[in-house]
Amino acid sequence: MTGELIIDGFMTGAQVIKLKNVSKIYQVGDQPVYALANITEHIKPGEYVAIMGPSGSGKSTLLNVLGCLLRPTEGSYQLNGQEINTLNDSELSKLRQSVIGFIFQSFHLIPRLTAAGNVELPMIFAGIAPQVRQQRVTQALEAVGLTARSHHRPDQLSVGQRQRVVIARATVMNPRLILADEPTGNLDSESGKQILGLLDQLYALGHTLIIVTHDINVAHRAERVLVISDGHIVQRTSSCNLTPESL
Amino acid sequence: MRVSDLMRLAMGTITTRPTRTALSLLGIAIGVITVILLTSIGEGTRRYVLSQFTQFGTNLLTITRGKTQTVGIPGVLGGTTHKLTIQDAQAIRQLDGIIRVVPVSVGNARVEAEGKGRSVSVFGITADMPEHWKFTVRSGRFLPPGDPFRRQSVAVLGPKLKTELFGNASPLGSFVRIAGYRFRIIGVMAPKGNLLGFDIDDAIYVPVASAMTIFNMDELMEIQVAFGFGHQLETIIQRIRERLMERHRGEEDFTIVTQAAMLETMDNIMQVITVAVAVIAGISMIVGAIGIMTVMWMVVRERTAEIGLLKATGATSGQIYQLFLCESVILATIGGGVGLAVGLSIVQILPTLIPGIPVHPHIHYVLAALCVSTLAGICSGFIPARYAASIDPVRALHTQ
Ligand SMILES: Nc1ncnc2c1ncn2[C@@H]1O[C@H](COP(=O)(O)OP(=O)(O)OP(=O)(O)O)[C@@H](O)[C@H]1O
Ligand SMILES: [Mg+2]
């Protein structure tokens, strides 16, 4: 089973992510557009990596490739030793279900469902029994401090609370890899800090965290920063060495 | 995914937009109502017609002039037609197993009395007619038994004709003129009502020989025959056919119509009508299905971002497909259920709104209507659901 494989990977400290010469090419008219160009990168389990770069440089594309939502046009992507190219669509779905949690800038909460209902969603599609789901929803909402808001619908929550529901949803399946695309982009600085605090907690719990951000203060929390420009990784640096000038 | 979760998720989206849900299933509901209503009327009519026929009993035969199977005009293209006569009727009466024979001659004539006149059907028959057709005499008596060749000038009135001519007064012993011939009234029939829209109360009954004189005819219109129970229908028909052919110089220039054959023909006609009506009504369900398909397209487009999210969190294309298909099937089934409830209610109250309308819901058509509506749901949900399943999650997450 994939699940065991992954846990083995984490136990042994092998690379969780191996990208080798990965390109993502979009055909716009006759012109090929290299959203990602020849990217080779390894990420270790439990690492906290920030991806930075100008708009249109390919940050989201990279995150979507890492999240198995996009297949690379060229190159190889191994997640926990599994070559993504060899998996079919429904195997990729299973992988996203059990290994990957997504946090979006614009939340993507389902408006007609309560906070609890939204958090429960990934478990429904995974076929988990209702009693187990109940328990895990409670835990996940407690972890983000929203126990009292579990029956509120998204429009009855502040934006900061919404993003906390998203974090609960992203972690409820206990995935090892958490991908966040500008998670604080729509938040005021106070709510942003809360969210970053929660991400720090996940990092402390051993989740591998990859976060796309424009904000240098956000990037400072990561161990490592990758700077992308025009689909290339132009800089790899420890976050302590990161200065506004280096971008 | 568990079936209960699938249903719950699909129901959730249906209940959040009640107005749109109602509108989308309206078409299917109307389709089902139409099918139930029309087939109930069809089935009711069929039963009504059958009951009208069987009220006379099933041991009856009718012998009519001419051979229905032969093509061509008898007497012109070879073969001579022999007239169906009172003698023929008497000969049939002699046969083993025959218990009653009524020679019948029918025409229309003006009946006058008390300065009033009315054009009605004149039945030339014999004393056995009331027993044969289960008619009863209300006052006076029916035509006397005896020699069918006797042209007695006595008549019995149908109740409607009696009221039209004599009002509340007793007509017994009075005289009427039928096409100028004078007849003495000896009885009035009890009301019988309509027979397939033909008012048999608006008639007058005279001896068959008298009727033939009035209409200047030398042959009967038909001979009514009743045979005893315990006799094989086929044997009886064979006996009658042999005897009549013998009398008609070997020509089979008559037709024996059995009650059973008549019933079967009527039943077939009515069934074909009911099925045709059901099919036409079923077509209205296509309109309903298109309604659901339109709504499902809207639903899928509106929820593109949601589909992207579900896929990102691990839902497979198959699960997305199931979810939307399930939604349209639920829509169609609710539509079918609403149509069923409303349709059957209308069938219940229709007779009080329109007295006398024959309605009878037929379980087969009711079930068929439900199946077709569910099928419509599957068909109309199929394409939108497939589209939903094929949505690219990255693009979908970009739409807002
Ligand atoms: N479906 C697509 N078809 C064609 N080109 C695309 C498609 N998706 C992305 N691109 C292109 O790929 C490049 C990288 O896009 P991407 O969304 O990854 O940028 P980004 O770094 O996330 O930008 P931002 O900071 O604005 O979110 C862009 O030039 C974009 O125009
Ligand atoms: Mg982006």
Image: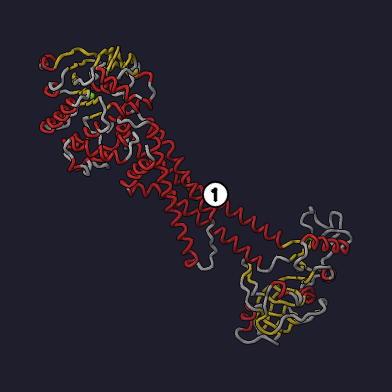
Residue A101 lies, with reference to residue B79, above or below; the image says above
Residue A244 vertical placement versus A134 (above, below): above
Classify mark 1 as within 8 Å of ligand 1 or not, answering yes or no. Answer: no
Q: Position of residue B50 (x, y in %)?
A: 63, 63
In the rendered image, the vertical position of residue A27 relative to residue B377, given as above or below: above
| Residue bearing the label numbered 1 | B279
Q: Which quadrant of the view contains residue A237?
A: top left
Quarter where residue A139 is shown: top left
| Foreground pick, B101 / B76 | B101
Q: Residue at x 47, y 52 (%)?
A: B32
Colour scheme shown: secondary structure
Q: Which SS class for mark 1?
A: helix
Disc 1 residue type? Val
Residue A63 in the image, given as x and y percentages of width and height:
25, 22
Q: Chain of mark 1?
A: B
Q: Nearer the viewer, residue B298 or B157?
A: B298
Q: Quadrant of ligand 1?
A: top left
Asked if A241 appears above or below B50 in the picture, the reply is above
Quadrant holding the N terminus of chain B: top left
- Please state the horizontal and vertical placement of residue A116, each as a whole percent of the image: 24, 40
Could you classify mark 1 by the number of other residues whose Cα lies within 10 Å: few (under 14), some (14-19), or many (20 or more)? some
Q: Nearer the viewer, residue B352 or B373?
A: B373
**Looking at the picture, how far across and down is residue A209, in whole percent?**
21, 23
